[in-house]
Amino acid sequence: MHGGAMTVASPETSLSLLEKLREQNSADAWERLVAIYTSVLHAWFRAPELQAADRDDLCQRVLEVLLRRLPEFRHNGQAGSFRTWLRGIAANMLRELWRKRPGSASESMMEKIADPHSSLSRLWDRQHDQHVLHSLMEIVEPEFPQATWQAFRRIAIDGATAREVAAELGKTVNAVLIAKSRVLTRLRQEAGVLLD
């Protein structure tokens, strides 16, 4: 994203994906969560000593824990609450794997995972936000006409001005801004607390 031009979600969003899972135990919501978070977890588990089979196993185990413990999750109003909570689950699963394989992970790696300010934790946060945003965009894109989606992408992702996009698309500046707003609103509805 260009210059941080896009803010997607707020904790106040009603009936977010997580709320649907907690309140309705929706199979559709669970499928969406799995689709969104599988790529995030695979990115997180790309440690040098993990093979694809280990990443797959860890992803599955984290998703199982997530399903079981999701009713316990409460957003605390702080940005990144869900991401931090999920990162804790992922880190615990990774520690458990490494404990079973003595010598496969260094103490410094475990310290980096535990430290929310470490370069590894910051990388995991960026990867989370990038993967979740990308997945959410894939989910909502088919709901919009191509011109609306193109206006949104050019402004929110590419950082073009509304005037530039209006000229490119042969639309008014107001129409371009409305298009961006509609897509952002829909992304916020879908994201809930997944992105803060």
Image (cartoon, helix red, strand yellow):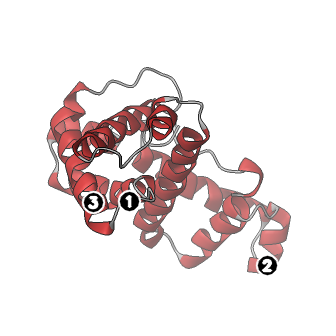
Q: Which of the 4 image quarters holds residue 38?
A: bottom left
Pointers 1 and 3 in contact (CB under 8 A)? no
Q: Secondary structure at mark 3?
A: helix
Residue 154: image location, x then y, percent: 71, 68
Q: Of the numbered discs in the image, which one, if any, rests on residue 42?
A: 1
Q: Secondary structure at mark 1?
A: helix
Q: Is residue 74 above or below residue 94?
A: above
- Name the kind of residue labelled 3 in the image: Asp
Q: Residues within 10 Å of mark 1 (few under 14, many from 20)?
A: some
Q: Residues within 10 Å of mark 3 (few under 14, many from 20)?
A: some
The residue that disc 2 covers is 168
Of the numbered discs 2 and 1, the one sitting upstream in the chain is 1
Q: Is residue 123 above or below residue 107?
A: below
- Name the kind of residue labelled 2 in the image: Glu
Front of the two marks 2 and 1: 1
Q: Is residue 119 above or below residue 52?
A: above
In the depicted view, which residue is nearer to us: 160 or 92? 92
Asked if one can make out residue 41 in the rendered structure from this viewpoint, the answer is yes
Q: Residues within 10 Å of mark 2 (few under 14, many from 20)?
A: few
Residue 52: image location, x then y, percent: 32, 67
The residue that disc 3 covers is 54
